[in-house]
């Protein structure tokens, strides 16, 4: 994916671009856009605290600290999205003042400070001038291939819609695979078509890295039920699930190495720390297309899987969302898994990381050149 640069010539043009940086239109949110000169370096979103809340100062320090971690940042723009009319006065002035103060302390210039409300938008530099929302909508949407802007920050975490027959077929295939792996004679008792599907799923389970690589390179809607069932089987087993997550964050040889290390671990050999580092969000910036492909497949598997067996794929969704810097989505998936299994390990870990405001170190990396490869979208202010 190449970096897409969009030119923003005014505050309203800037506001029209922000949802495309976040892939959603935020609600009740503070957005921080780090800048390197006139070039944006992405965007970060946090939930707004209640006005006057004692946590405002701490959150202001946290978000500016996160902006400072983005390499080459020398300035920030601040945008508040509030579901209130602006005519009675701009909301969250105290919080924005705290953010501006922390930015100044850290030596960051303030590019802009804006608010979008229910009845218009305004600048915190000119609080009495309320502009119509139509000014934002008047700017043409950036042409970014494959980009979908969701109506809020949580809707993209909803699992895909699955028809009842597909869900029944998937659940039956999962059960068939479990039986076939434990009692090889059982497969002879089913019809040829069903047996072929079982054999295909079992073959995928027999070579997990090859299965995970197929998923990383194939659109989810082109994966057949057998491949998805094989993935579902693996995601229920932490050792195989971790191979998938590390491989999607790295490459096939690393997946092979992790699978070998997991096998050796059963004999008492410790797993090499360098192979475990990606699970903790350490190491090189992953290819975002691999993370997204893994997440798309895991979301579909979670939607197909019977409710009581969903914590595994939901936890994988949570980690992949976290690895891609989507903390709100990660929390949604993890909380959903924990409602089914209150002691699900990976889900507890991801939720703890999100609650602590901890993201992978690679989230703060960006391509070194607008012409280079990467996943970031940006704009130039003039």
Image (spheres, helix red, strand yellow):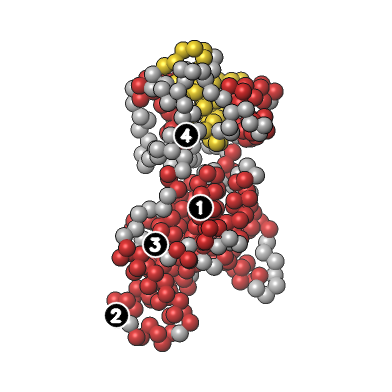
Pick whichever of labels 1 and 3 is earlier in the sequence. 3
Q: Residues within 10 Å of mark 3 (few under 14, many from 20)?
A: many
Dot 3: element: helix
Pick whichever of labels 2 and 1 is earlier in the sequence. 2
Mark 2 → mark 1, Cα distance in angstroms? 37 Å
Mark 3 → mark 4, Cα distance in angstroms? 30 Å
Dot 2: element: helix
Mark 3 → mark 2, Cα distance in angstroms? 23 Å
Instruction: Give the quarter of the image for residue 106.
Output: top right
Pick whichever of labels 4 and 1 is earlier in the sequence. 4
- In the image: residue 45, left or right of residue 307: right
Mark 4 → mark 1, Cα distance in angstroms? 19 Å
Whether the residues at callouts 3 and 2 have beta carbons within 8 Å, the answer is no
Q: Which residue is mark 3?
A: 304
Q: Residue at x 46, y 29 (%)?
A: 83
Frontmost residue, 250 versus 280: 280
Residue 299 coordinates in the image, percent (x, y): 43, 55
Frontmost residue, 10 versus 344: 344
Of the 4 image quadrants, the one containing the N terminus is top left
Q: Which mark is residue 192?
A: 2
Q: Which mark is residue 27?
A: 4
Dot 4: element: loop
> Which of pointers 3 and 4 indicates the residue nearer the eye?
4
Pick whichever of labels 2 and 4 is earlier in the sequence. 4
Q: Which residue is mark 1?
A: 333
> Which of pointers 3 and 2 indicates the residue nearer the eye?
3
């Amino acid at each position: 994916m190449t970096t897409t640069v969009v030119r923003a010539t005014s505050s309203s043009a800037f506001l029209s671009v922000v949802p495309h940086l976040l892939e959603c239109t935020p609600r009740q949110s503070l957005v921080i856009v780090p800048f390197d000169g006139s070039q944006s370096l992405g965007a970060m979103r946090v939930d707004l605290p209640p006005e006057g809340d004692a946590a405002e100062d701490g959150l202001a320090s946290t978000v500016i600290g996160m902006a400072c971690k983005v390499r080459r940042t020398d300035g920030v723009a601040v945008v508040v999205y509030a579901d209130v009319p602006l005519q009675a006065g701009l909301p969250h002035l105290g919080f924005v003042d705290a953010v501006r103060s922390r930015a100044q302390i850290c030596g960051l210039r303030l590019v802009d400070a804006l608010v979008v409300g229910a009845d218009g938008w305004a600048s915190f530099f000119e609080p009495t001038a309320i502009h119509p929302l139509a000014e934002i909508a008047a700017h043409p949407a950036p042409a970014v291939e494959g980009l979908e802007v969701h109506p809020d920050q949580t809707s993209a975490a909803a699992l895909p819609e699955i028809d009842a027959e597909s869900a029944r077929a998937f659940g039956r295939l999962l059960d068939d695979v479990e039986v076939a792996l434990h009692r090889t004679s059982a497969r002879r008792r089913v019809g040829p078509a069903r047996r072929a599907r079982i054999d295909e799923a079992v073959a995928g389970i027999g070579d997990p890295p090859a299965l995970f690589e197929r998923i990383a390179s194939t659109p989810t809607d082109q994966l057949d039920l057998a491949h998805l069932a094989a993935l579902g089987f693996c995601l229920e087993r932490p050792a195989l699930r971790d191979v998938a997550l590390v491989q999607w964050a790295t490459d096939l040889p690393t997946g092979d190495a992790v699978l070998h290390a997991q096998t050796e671990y059963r004999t008492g050999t410790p797993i090499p720390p360098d192979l475990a580092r990606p699970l903790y969000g350490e190491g090189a910036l992953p290819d975002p297309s691999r993370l997204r492909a893994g997440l798309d497949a895991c979301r579909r598997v979670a939607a197909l899987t019977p409710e009581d067996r969903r914590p595994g794929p939901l936890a994988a969704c949570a980690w992949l969302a976290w690895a891609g810097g989507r903390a709100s989505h990660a929390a949604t998936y993890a909380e959903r898994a924990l409602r089914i299994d209150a002691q699900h390990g990976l889900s507890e870990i991801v939720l703890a990381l999100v609650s602590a405001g901890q993201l992978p170190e690679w989230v703060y990396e960006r391509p070194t050149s607008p012409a280079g490869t990467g996943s970031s979208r940006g704009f130039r202010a003039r």
